[in-house]
Amino acid sequence: MSKLIISPSLLSANFGDLKSDLERVNQSEADWLHIDIMDGVFVPNISFGFPVLKYVSELSTKPLDVHLMIVQPEKFIREVKDLGAMMMNVHYEACPHLHRVIQQVKESGMKAGVTLNPATPVSLLTDIISDVDLVLLMSVNPGFGGQKFIPHTLNKVRELKELILRTGSRALIEVDGGVNLETGAMLAGEGADVLVAGNAVFHAPDMIDMIRQLKNLR
Ligand code: DX5
Ligand code: ZN
């Protein structure tokens, strides 16, 4: 199995000194930078909007992995693309016309990911798995950093891996929420490809070393 991809989650950064945190991520072995956009409707919280993210995109040398926790994410494909994002993740639960949204994201030139809340079964992906570049499994209920990992996610990673192998899909498996060295090791063992980590990275005594340790879990 190939090396893990590490995507530190900006939500847990120190916004009083964002530039320093972003510089540390730039210097680290992190592969991507994970960006959580919330609307206070799809999730009970609001994060940051495009003016702040424009600044982040100028400072970050890592590809942006954007996770939209908003209703009607298709309305913002242009804005996300204009940030220079590499990946746009939309929630399954927010897209009644998921196939159309996935095609629109890909036509824009970005990679397209679909995200599942903890209670949404992997089996619902059967008819879209061949179209997506990535599946993002939420291992907490989305909206906040620093929550406890939901262990059932490990079963979902296993099931998703089977679906991907069975269908010949090339989708990567990303997991988001409560990822640390312990849960990250278990996820790596089940076949996760990408680990998002907010608190574990940005609240570590040595962020660069924590990213290195996560990266070397497999
Ligand atoms: C939660 C976000 C996560 C969050 C993860 O809604 O999608 O990306 O930042 O934070 P940790 O790693 O602290 O659980
Ligand atoms: Zn996220």
Image: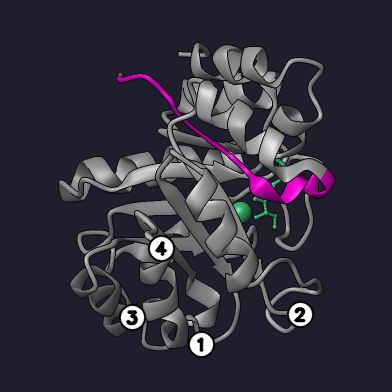
Within-10-Å neighbours for mark 1: few <14, some 14–19, many 20+: some
Instruction: Report the residue marked by disc 1.
Output: 72
Quadrant placement of the N terminus: top left
> Disc 2 residue type?
Gly
Q: Is residue 150 left or right of residue 165?
A: right
Measured as percent of width and height from the top left, residue 25 is found at 58, 30
Measured as percent of width and height from the top left, residue 201 is found at 70, 29
Q: CA distance from mark 2 to mark 3?
A: 21 Å
> Disc 4 residue type?
Met
> Disc 1 residue type?
Gln
Can I make out residue 121 in this image?
no
Above/below status of 112 relative to 204: below
Instruction: Report the residue marked by disc 2.
Output: 40
Q: CA distance from mark 3 to mark 1?
A: 9 Å
Give the mark nearer the N terminus: 4 vs 1: 1
Instruction: Report the residue marked by disc 4.
Output: 88
> Disc 3 residue type?
Val
Determine the secondary structure under disc 4: strand
Residues 195 and 47: in front is 47
User: Ligand 1 closer than 8 Å to the CB at disc 2?
Assistant: no
Q: CA distance from mark 1 to mark 2?
A: 13 Å
Determine the secondary structure under disc 3: helix
**In percent of the image, x 58 and y 84: which residue is there?**
71
Determine the secondary structure under disc 1: loop
What number is the disc on residue 101? 3
Q: Is residue 141 left or right of residue 166?
A: right
**Are the residues at dot 2 and dot 3 in contact (C-beta closer than 8 Å)?**
no
Determine the secondary structure under disc 2: loop
Quadrant placement of the C terminus: top left
